[in-house]
């Protein structure tokens, strides 16, 4: 484990640098140093930007330096996007300049061939000697939306990533801004990190950094391999006791693991061992790529449930049945509502439900539907017999309830029980609009019934792990 | 099994009536007979529309009849939306009028209480005597988009449902137009049917009807119960030998089954028995509500694969690894591409891939990216070593490739191997736009990597079942 010696500096220089050197092509285009500088400027990064390229004198109004040594100021972070064979030399210069954090975007290392593997080894050796920490190589890089710090090497097509409590890190560039519509999201992100080949900085380093990052409330990871199993167990156990850690792990099958080894040059882990490790350390395991971006929302924006008792507000019995089936996977049970709640519901409309609250029947016949809806929500959300709420919303055929819905949900902000919503209706436009508005209010909306239930179920499991057995 | 005697007429009168009587409230509003008439007119239904209500003389330009008997023409189908206690009487009148198909939208039957259960029994008895078939009660009804026949009792907010080869039937109104955005879809539907309480017409009747319905190529079902296990086995085995049948079954858990019994008054089936039945009869089992609307697309619009060998075209290795892992669940394997393909790919760009074709690396550096993309697709789709293709598309940051993509995919229409696509990128707008365009060309796009793979995997399994062991 030679990389452990590299731990000379924390990761703060990566995510909160006062100055960044961008070493690579400054040609206008879709990829490269030019894009990094442009995206940093657009995102409003306040630190110093120092493009390095002997062929340019200025780019986008920024002075360009012929080499790293020529930069007069102190540099916290260097981002390298040059041919792989030139990387070791530049890395040495970084060391001489006193730079202690380097993102190597360049590919052609362990993921490619023997020569690349050797090159990666050389690079790590240089970094160790110089006390440099590396993210990458073969990475799409990092981001810290809070600081407008989006040094993305690919064109992204938008300016800002909304800041918020979710950190997303992965062994792939599929989580970086050019691949995911952060600009269109209604929830916020604290840090983004593509580990690339994980030659140095890995999942454990990142978990440790995020553990004490005040901007991060929940950590979502996509991994194909674990670099150090023992350390992973120790670190993840400690981190999950403070913040929920959600992991999507691929390379689960033999062929998947084999292919994974060839694309990032890393060794995959036996899946059963990993699964056991997750259970032991309280990690929440994800099952689809989309969950990586969806499930963290419940932890980021809603309180943890105090138990496993699920309340269901639906417009149709079938969704209630689906929710109960799904909830059972996570140990959720759907109890009888309190006598008080049942009495109130019955007074509102006979047969509204004793367990599942089905708004469908009154909706079809009652005129002042929204006042009923408000009463129902108000009553159910405070029922002492339930710990979390799966909330189904029907948009109406022309978004006619939107304003009233939002007024009601604004009144529910600050509720003490997590609410996960699923929205449906006959027009995509109104579903999307209602989803955005709800998430802007801090109520996470999930694209599937099953995912909403998984959110509440894993939140309940996590709360139990964190709080000890009840 | 008294209902078996009801099989006096086929279901054709339900889905292709020349005339419909609409019995219920004609008050303008969100729900009821008024909405049915309005929606039929808007959708361009060419048959006769006969509203029945003693308090009206005309509605929406249509003559209203005081009773069913007064209608001078022959009526193929009646749709009843009145208080449950009045249903038996009206049903008798329907019988006297010679109507043989009735949709009972009214609720308050077996799903409500003992009285309703008795009422339902009485209704079925009347129907049996009169040779009437019933869909419902407690149903949101049916639709046949091919005929502009959308007698929906709830306001839907759009006019047309695109006609196409997918039939969607369920024990819930969640599949009816007021609950699902059929009007915004880019794939077509042949029939929609909410069974409601399944007092008469059930999943087997519907499968038998759809078996010989030329407009239907694939059948998607949501069920909470099976009315007759023996018949279900027999019918589904025969139907799946002709058309794929996909079923989402809830009431899987004890609590789910219990609740299900209370909301449609039907008895749920032990889930393990059902699972065995699916395996035996070749039914494809679904796992989420969304799959009900997504998975049929591969069967509707793409050819069946000739084997289980999966080809992967991706922009990033991670998605390839996820696809391999997921494919293993369905027996898909990712083979080495043919020597010819590998040679061509290598000539296009060294390291494009021998198994997974990863367009990411060349995309970042090659200028004429689209011509490469075309060559790659052209080569991979005809590779004799693969039977189906998982195709990842990156939209670009500003939809800049859309036109060229579409030109290329237009050239791939009529390909002999199924292609399932997943689209990603940094802007929701372009992802949605590209998805619509692709589906308009007949290339199904799935919202998740995992669902795209499941589509190809179940298609491969179905092809194998249908073609016998290879």
Image (tube, coloured by chain):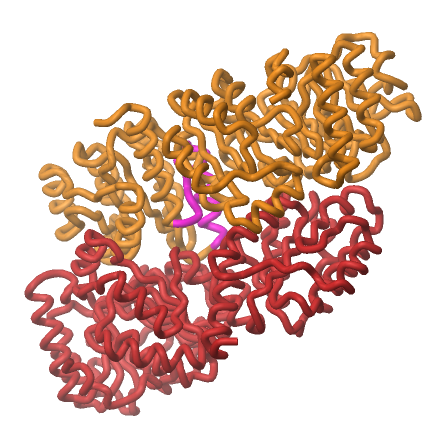
Chain colours: A orange, B red
User: Observer-nearest residue: B399 or A279?
Assistant: A279
Q: Is residue A400 visible?
A: no
Q: In the image, what residue occupies the spot 44% across and 41% down?
A: A286
| Residue B17 at x, y percent in the picture | 36, 85
Where residue B432 appears, as percent x and y from the top left, is 58, 52
- Is A438 inside the magenta-drawn segment? yes
Q: Which part of the image, by quadrant, shows the N terminus of chain B?
A: bottom left
Residue depicted at 49% across the width and 51% down the height: A429
Q: Residue at x 41, y 24 (%)?
A: A237
- B114 relative to B18, above or below: above
Picture quadrant of residue A385: top left
Is A99 or A89 nearer to us in this picture? Answer: A89
Queried whether the magenta region covers residue B356, the answer comes back as: no
A371, above or below B234, in the image: above
Q: Is residue A57 visible?
A: yes
Quarter location, residue A305: top left
Horizontally, residue B129 falls left or right of residue A407, namely left
Where is residue B207 shown, x and y percent of the image? 35, 78
* Magenta residue span: A428-448
Q: Position of residue B116 (x, y in %)?
A: 10, 66
Query: In percent of the image, x 30 and y 53: which residue is there?
Result: A322
Question: Is A166 left, or right, of B251 in this rendering?
Answer: right
């Amino acid at each position: 484990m030679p990389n452990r010696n590299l731990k000379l500096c924390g990761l703060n220089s990566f995510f909160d640098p006062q100055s960044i050197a961008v070493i690579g092509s400054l040609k206008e285009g879709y990829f490269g140093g030019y894009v990094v500088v442009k995206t940093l400027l657009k995102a409003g990064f306040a630190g110093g930007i120092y493009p390095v390229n002997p062929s340019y004198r200025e780019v986008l109004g920024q002075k360009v330096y012929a080499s790293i040594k020529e930069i007069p100021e102190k540099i916290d972070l260097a981002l390298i996007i040059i041919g792989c064979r030139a990387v070791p030399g530049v890395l040495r210069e970084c060391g001489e300049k006193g730079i202690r954090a380097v993102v190597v975007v360049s590919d052609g290392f362990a993921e490619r061939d023997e020569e690349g593997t050797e090159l990666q080894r050389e690079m790590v050796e240089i970094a160790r000697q110089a006390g440099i920490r590396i993210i990458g190589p073969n990475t799409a890089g990092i981001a810290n939306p809070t600081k407008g710090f989006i040094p993305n090497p690919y064109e992204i097509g938008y300016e800002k990533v909304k800041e918020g409590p979710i950190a997303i890190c992965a062994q792939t560039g599929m989580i970086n801004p050019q691949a995911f519509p952060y600009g269109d999201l209604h929830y916020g992100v604290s840090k983004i990190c593509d580990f690339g080949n994980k030659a140095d900085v890995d999942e454990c380093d990142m978990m440790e950094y995020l553990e004490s990052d005040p901007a991060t409330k929940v950590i979502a990871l996509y991994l194909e391999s674990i670099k150090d199993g023992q350390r992973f167990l120790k670190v993840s156990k400690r981190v999950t006791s403070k913040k929920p850690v959600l992991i999507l792990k691929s390379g689960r099958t033999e062929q998947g693991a084999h292919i994974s080894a060839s694309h990032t040059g890393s060794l995959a882990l036996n899946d059963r061992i990993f699964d056991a490790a997750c259970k032991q350390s309280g990690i929440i395991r994800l099952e689809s790529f989309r969950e990586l971006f969806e499930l963290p929302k419940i932890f980021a924006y809603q309180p943890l449930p105090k138990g496993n008792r699920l309340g269901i507000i639906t417009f149709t019995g079938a969704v209630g049945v689906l929710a109960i089936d799904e909830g059972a996977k996570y140990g959720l049970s759907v109890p009888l509502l309190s006598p008080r709640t049942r009495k109130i519901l019955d007074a509102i409309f006979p047969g509204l439900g004793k367990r599942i609250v089905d708004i469908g029947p009154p909706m079809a016949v009652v005129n002042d539907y929204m006042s009923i809806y408000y009463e129902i929500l108000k009553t159910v959300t405070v029922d002492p017999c339930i710990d979390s709420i799966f909330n189904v919303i029907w948009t109406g055929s022309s978004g006619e309830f939107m304003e009233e819905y939002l007024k009601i949900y604004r009144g529910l902000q600050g509720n003490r029980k997590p609410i996960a919503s699923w929205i449906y209706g006959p027009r995509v436009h109104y579903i999307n609009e209602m989803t955005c508005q709800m998430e802007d209010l801090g109520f996470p909306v999930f694209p599937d019934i099953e995912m909403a239930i998984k959110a509440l179920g894993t939140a309940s499991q996590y709360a139990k792990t964190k709080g000890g057995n009840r």
